[in-house]
Amino acid sequence: MKVLLIGSGGREHALAWKLAQSPLMTEFYAAPGNPGIAEHATLVSVNVDDHDAVIAFCKDKAIDFVVVGPEAPLVAGIADRLRREGIAVFGPSAAAAQLEGSKGFTKDICARYDIPTGAYQRFDNAPQAKAYIREQGAPIVVKADGLAAGKGVTVAMTVDEALVAVDDCFEGAFGEAGAEVVVEAYLDGEEASFFCLSDGKHALALATAQDHKRVGEGDTGPNTGGMGAYSPAPVMTPEMVERTMKEIIEPTMRGMAESGYPFSGVFFAGLMITANGPELIEYNVRFGDPECQVLMMRLKSDLLPLLLATANGTLDQVKAEWNEDPALTVVMASKGYPGSYEKNTPIRHVPEAGEGAKVFQAGTALKDGALVATGGRVLNVTASGKTVGEAQSRAYALLDKVEWDNGFCRRDIGWQAIKREKA
């Protein structure tokens, strides 16, 4: 089978690593990819924003299946275009991708289909949003409606902080993403990530994870795209997974189909486990980054048939098997992230990893034959172990062999799970 993977981040390196292990794979391409992905696939310089160019490449190489990694091409409708041309694709339509592309759209779906989530209001102007915030009080959550690369959310502990967040959105801090704002109730509990494949009619639960959004140890500092993750999430007990499927995933899948937006792809549900059970914080319509890295480390099954069944509407005919051992990934980021940072800093050495470990590359490139850091989040140092504590020790031991002067990381990834293990 000839496969094209779209994307260039750590998530796509993890997908490429896992897809390349499939005996079904005959030719494997990635656009644009990165030096890590080049270990597994042939990199092609196709502009993924140019749908005509993507179609032309697929026809030229007789591509059987396209796997779309990031959210932006999905929101832009690349999956629709591929389907119109008769090319199988993993990823939702632009209409269904609104679940990530518009936080207001998601909240409206939740309201319509009785999916548990925080109370909310949508606003297209600052004065009304601010009046609502003053009326509700803090803590409260302010979200830019559109795609903001994981940075358009403020969990405001004071009214003043929330008012500043509203100004940030409407004054252009997040570009077009902030043209509308969603203000919602603060949910108290423990966060978890839940992943589930959907072909529009059937759902296949995958696995759980916990991400670390804050840049600093002890979950301090500004939100980032994620500084590390581990899987499974201990808070997601079998009962909580069952409730999530019944109360959140299945009503969403039915509701999307009824609304005329059947969903084919991966539901990535950001959850808050509250005293009342699971409540939805937000949906993403692609695998998480860095959660994908720990999911792929734990997945025993061949990934390719699972993604194909999702695309072909035969998800009820496959199953996913998982290694029980937890996996943990630590993000190495450029100093200064999530603010401004120096680009093209040299990475002198990325260590070879043994069984159950891997350094996935995210914001990297080759410059004059040498590996350099081009992004904010650059390397995802990943390992498995019998416990989260063991996975953490293995990941940090591997990370300490990386030679990159401009890199930094958090040293407490997995702290919640390790605290439970020691209790």
Image: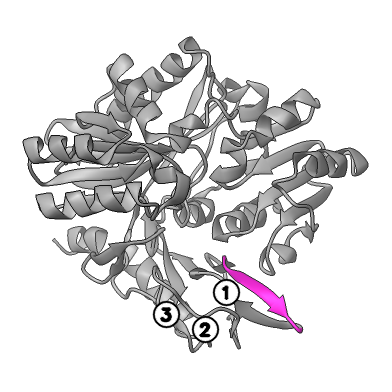
Mark 3–mark 2 Cα distance, whole angstroms, equals 15 Å
Q: Is residue 308 visible?
A: no
Report the residue at 12% width, 54% height from top: 160
Give x and y (percent) for residue 72: 57, 44
In the image, which residues are magenta?
Answer: 362-368
Report the residue at 41% width, 58% height from top: 225
Where residue 107 sits, quadrant-wise, is top left
312 falls in the magenta region? no
For residue 402, which numbered disc appears in the image?
2
Report the residue at 66% width, 54% height from top: 16
Left or right, residue 272 beside residue 373: left
Per the image, label 3 sits on a secondary structure element best described as loop
| Whether label 2 touches label 1, CB < 8 Å | no
Left or right, residue 340 beside residue 85: left
Would you name the residue on which mark 1 appears?
353
Viewer-nearest of labels 1 and 3?
3
Give x and y (percent) for residue 354: 57, 73
- The N terminus sits in image quarter: top right
The three-letter code of the residue at mark 2 reads: Val
Per the image, label 2 sits on a secondary structure element best described as loop
Number of other residues with Cα within 10 Å of mark 2, as a class: few under 14, some 14 to 19, many 20 or more: some
Disc 1 or 3, which lies upstream in sequence? 3
Give x and y (percent) for residue 204: 49, 29
Mark 1–mark 3 Cα distance, whole angstroms, equals 24 Å
Viewer-nearest of labels 2 and 1?
2
Report the residue at 75% width, 52% height from top: 47
